[in-house]
Amino acid sequence: MSTSGLLRFPAHLARICTVPRGLRLCQKPALLTPGTAGAPVQAAGKKDHPALLSLDERELEEQFVKGHGPGGQATNKTSNCVVLRHIPSGIVVKCHQTRSVDQNRKLARRILQEKVDVFYNGENSPVYKEKREAEKRKQERKKRAKETLEKKKLLKEQWESSKNVPRERTTSSDWKNVPDASRDGGVSPTTSAVTAPLKETM
């Protein structure tokens, strides 16, 4: 392949490196397969807690079973689901979040570590504190949403009640008390009262 041909090669399929012998194709990107992931999965917890109790591999009992759910034969006929048991506490976790056995093993240990820490430390566990704060924030959001809904409901009721208030309308009986301008030469008493001072000044 010529140098010009290499320069026209798509950048996302190859990387051009400068070497003493000239330009050549030196590396191809690894294609992602269903069993690999481009980034570590953070499904076990939102944050990493370095202060958690460490797990002893000698106290763990690990099994690999067939998965279930969507994914076809790659999921239902492959033993990539990890069942991890902590022997001293008896806590058992089951992880089948990815198709990769290695990823599921890491995630299962992270989930088990959080559960074991809460089991032994109780309210002093950072995982327990984080979940408690999240629950508190959730309750506050629900409270604010309820207050907002009640305010909207009250405003709607006030608006509906203002629409139903009857307005005062002028009836035929009210017009009987109004003097007729066609009488007395077409001049009403109100007009006469206004024009009288003007005639005296003239």
Image (tube, grey):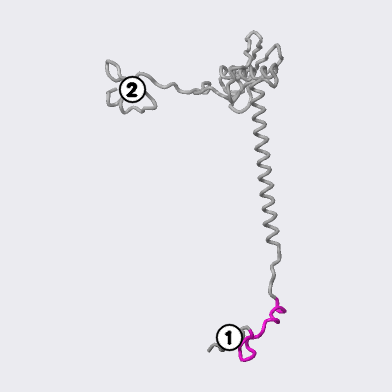
Which kind of residue does numbered mark 1 sit on?
A: Pro
Residue at figure coordinates x 70%, y 11% from the top left: 88
Circle nearer the viewer, 2 or 1 = 1
Residue 134 covered by magenta stretch = no
Instruction: Determine whether label 2 and label 1 are within 8 Å by CB.
Output: no
Mark 1, Cα crowd under 10 Å, few <14 / some 14-19 / many 20+, is few
State the residue position of label 1.
197
Q: Could you say whether the residue bearing mark 2 is in a helix, strand or loop?
A: strand
* Distance CA(mark 2)–CA(mark 1): 106 Å
Residue 184 covered by magenta stretch = yes
Q: How many marks?
A: 2
Which kind of residue does numbered mark 2 sit on?
A: Ile
| Location of the N terminus (image quadrant) | top left
Which stretch appears magenta?
171-189
Residue at figure coordinates x 39%, y 27% from the top left: 12
Please tell me whether residue 154 is drawn above or below residue 180 in the rendered image: above
State the residue position of label 2.
16
Q: Could you say whether the residue bearing mark 1 is in a helix, strand or loop?
A: helix
Residue at figure coordinates x 70%, y 78% from the top left: 174
Q: Relative to the observer, which residue lies in front, 58 or 139?
A: 139
